[in-house]
Image: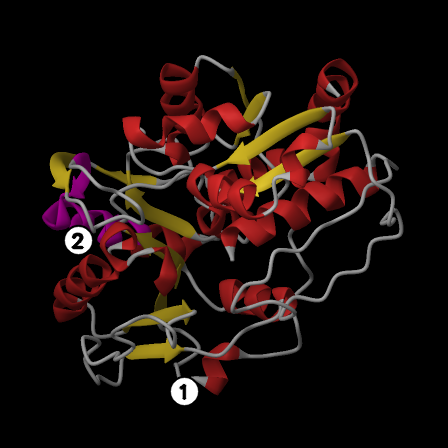
Amino acid sequence: MGLGEDLRSFAAMLEYLKINFSVIDIPTDVQGLVKVGWSHLTQVDYKTSIFFMSPIECQKLADLHPQLFSKPEKKIGYFLWELPDFPAEQANALQLVDQIWCPTRFVQEVFFKTSRRLTLSLPLPVVQHPPANIDFRALLQIPPKAFVVLFVFDARSTMQRKNPQATLRVFMEFAKAHPDAYLILKISRWENIKDSSLSWIPALPNIKVIQQTLSPQELSSLYSASDCYLSLHRSEGFGRTLVEALQHGLYLVTTDFSGPKDFLTPDNACLVSWNKATAKAGDYPKLTQDSWWAEPDEGQAVEKLSHAREKAKISRNQVGIEDGKRFSFEALASKYLPIIKTYL
């Protein structure tokens, strides 16, 4: 889960800074699938608690386990939200904590205008793992010189927001003129959604689907086997997979909206324009009234994909690789240490 990776990334940052911590793991349907080993992990109760979850899930936790909120002296919510406004009827959830931390200015603005709490935009590390000894092109029967487009998404993050259908439509239109193109869809947590059928994905030889859980090292090999990352999301709070794609030198074709605007530029990505569209109640978890998000221009995305293909013929995305380094422990430690000393 993305929120689980947020917690693991912050714990790894504390490891890097040699700061002790403990972890309370909230059970989920994917618990135990990611192995961790932290030398600074303890069983001590500390004075500060940080909650890595959505505000609405935080309210549920407070209702079930009020001692988790009454016992700590200081409470911080590392909260995520992926729409440009926060439901007024859920605003009380933001009052559970003393401070709000979040990954991007997009999310910071949403929470601050609703809560008026101290709200800091603090991106988390994105760890680049060494690749596993796996040749995904050979495994998926993709020719060595093919142009490979990748999209990684969590089916439980809502299909409407991740918008994989647009990725498919754009790729299929692009592939009409480029028969050497292949698309890999890496889908996680699809089994437990109400309609777990993947029948919307056409059974074509140039479209490959990976459904099994991959280790971080295996995922790194998958990025290394790809040339371009195509994300036509309607909104992102952060966009971790976009950073991972940058770090691995992929060319990005992606919607120019929401959280990723903090780190994506015309120099490191092929940005796709969009029109404002309604996000209806039910399109996003716990959304009870209409909001809005981006509807990417699919015609423009096809053109951008052609640009990415031409660039990939020459080299990897060197600008992206350099920009991805800003999410390393070394780059973020100088930002986090004074924040931790000041606010904790």
Q: Is any atom of residue 311 visible in this view?
A: yes
Dot placed on the residue nearer the N-terminal end, 1 or 2: 1
**Three-letter residue code for mark 1:** Gln
* Dominant SS type (magenta): helix
Cα separation, mark 1 vs mark 2, equals 24 Å
Residue 333 inside the magenta-drawn segment: no
Which label was assigned to residue 89? none
Q: Is residue 144 left or right of residue 323?
A: left
Q: Label 1 belongs to which residue?
A: 141
Q: Foreground residue, 57 or 292?
A: 57
Q: Is the Cβ of the residue at disc 1 closer than 8 Å to that at disc 2?
A: no
- Residue 304 magenta-drawn? yes
Instruction: Judge by depth and name the residue closer to the eye, 337 or 101.
Output: 101
Up the image or down, 142 lies above or below 276; here it is below
| Crowdedness near tag 1: few (<14), some (14–19) or many (≥20) residues, C-alpha within 10 Å | few
265 vs 215, left or right, is: left
Q: Is residue 302 above or below residue 121?
A: below
Residue ID at (23%, 47%): 304
Q: Please tell me which residue lies in front, 213 or 171.
A: 213
Snapshot quadrant of residue 135: bottom right
Residue 302: numbered disc: 2
Amino acid on which disc 2 is placed: Val
Where is residue 298 drawn, in percent x and y? 13, 50
Residue stretch in magenta: 291-308
Secondary structure at numbered mark 2: helix
Q: From the viewer's perspective, is residue 257 above or below residue 204?
A: above
Could you tell me which secondary element the residue under label 1 belongs to?
A: loop
> What residue is shown at x 44% (from left), y 47% (from top)?
242
Residue 152 in sight from this viewpoint = no
